[in-house]
Image (cartoon, rainbow, N blue to C red):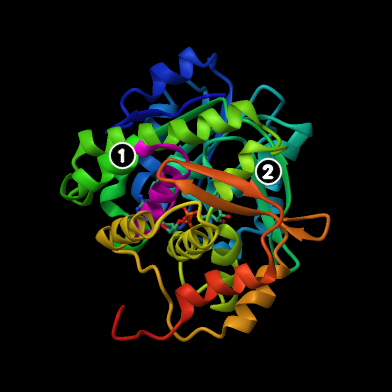
Amino acid sequence: MIAPYISDSFEMLPLKLTESGFSRGKVMLVGDTNTMPIYGNEAGGYLSRVFDGVFCHEFKAGEEHKNLRSVEELLLELLDRRFERGDCVAALGGGVTGDMAGFAAAVYLRGIRVIQLPTTLLAQIDSSIGGKTAVDFNGYKNMVGAFHMPELVYANTSVLKTLPKEQFAAGMGEVIKSAVLGDRELFYWLAGHRGDVMNLLPDALTDMISQTAAIKTGIVTRDPKEQGERALLNLGHTIGHAIEKYMNFEMLHGECVAVGTSAALRISRMRGMIDEAVENEVNALFRDYGLQTKVPGLPEDKILEFTKSDKKMKGGKIRFILPAGIGSAVVSDDVTEEELLCGIRAVTAQKTGND
Ligand SMILES: NC(=O)c1ccc[n+]([C@@H]2O[C@H](COP(=O)([O-])OP(=O)(O)OC[C@H]3O[C@@H](n4cnc5c(N)ncnc54)[C@H](O)[C@@H]3O)[C@@H](O)[C@H]2O)c1
């Protein structure tokens, strides 16, 4: 499994490409309508030091364009430019770009090389790592996809300066989730470095991104095809995803993961796996980084219904990830409907005087 290379510029990109075995050939730089105008020229310039031909392909930004039509347009351009087996796709953008371009690279000529140049916090710590690629299909998220490992993941932290604040906060939702499920030290590091992280200090970003990426890299190395441990990364995603869907994707994914993790904490607490202090500590860290842990007023029955129809079910049972303390979590196949309701209620109940 390739750990991301983290830097605060694109300068080292040619060297890293050469070290990854690239020399000459063609590259298709794929970005969306936000990332390509800002970073296309700069990234393309560095790519041209290694590749003979650099082509650019732009598609419309947004989850609604993570679909087969965008893939088809990219495939047509690859075909037009006569891309061959040894050529390469470079995804310059967030998870949408990485997933869409990665999937096109996975299926073009049964798979050509791909590198990831992630530009959102979420992509730098999560989606660019691990080789999952996919597009949405027929109303379902990530329904059509493939496992296709990138040959290089190059995260330039300086691009986070242009990332909208709410997108950065949503990425922090996944960072904190990762710390809760797998790295106690990172959790307390985050608690102590809030100012540095929020001010985007390069050293703090490098530390945080490398520590968070290492959690995913470790898990995916041990379980590349999600046979077991990889499911832990879905902490906060089952109820979080139900809320995301119910809200018609008006809340960002990482924001919903924070709420979903909060619901999972309550279920763990009801089972006696963690105490109230741990629940409060995690919720407080989410809030410190600008994330809410409740969405008061959502209808609990609807959220339950959406949760039960989530695709992360195994043999008709909900596959649920429960925090077992700060820095550890377990996969559970026996969370009852009553427990789910209890978790949902904890994050949807209207505020009381005690909140
Ligand atoms: N493959 C995986 O393992 C995996 C894991 C988690 C999430 N995902 C997928 O990732 C997607 C979400 O990714 P995302 O949150 O990065 O969303 P995104 O790619 O839509 O990016 C969010 C927004 O920020 C803009 N943007 C990106 N980088 C920017 C920058 N540096 N400056 C200014 N604007 C910038 C984008 O154009 C977009 O408008 C979802 O589709 C999700 O399914 C995949």
Compare residues 258 and 40 and report the one nearer the observer: 258
Which residue position holds label 1? 157
Answer above or below: position of 38 versus 9: below
Task: Provide the major secondary structure of the magenta segment.
Answer: helix
Compare residues 219 and 90 and report the one nearer the observer: 219
Any magenta on residue 36? no
Local packing at callout 2 (Cα closer than 10 Å; few below 14, some 14-19, many 20+) is many
> Can you give x and y, in whole percent of width and height, for residue 86 in the image?
67, 22
Q: Which image quarter holds the N terminus?
A: top right
Which residue position holds label 2? 104
Label 2 CB-ligand 1 distance < 8 A: no
Answer above or below: position of 56 versus 255: above
> Can you give x and y, in whole percent of width and height, for residue 273 in the image?
50, 51
Q: Amino acid at mark 2?
A: Ala
Answer above or below: position of 28 versus 122: above
Q: Earlier in the sequence, mark 1 or mark 2?
A: 2
Q: Is residue 58 visible?
A: no
> Can you give x and y, in whole percent of width and height, for residue 5 in the image?
40, 26
Q: Amino acid at mark 1?
A: Thr
Answer above or below: position of 139 versus 317: below
Q: Looking at the rendering, which quadrant does residue 233 occupy?
A: top right
Secondary structure of residue under mark 1: helix
Residue placed at 68% from the left, 30% from the top?
A: 112
Any magenta on residue 169? yes
Position of 6 compared to 96: left or right? left
Magenta-drawn segment: 168-184
Local packing at callout 1 (Cα closer than 10 Å; few below 14, some 14-19, many 20+) is many
Position of 47 compared to 200: left or right? right
Q: Is residue 96 visible?
A: yes
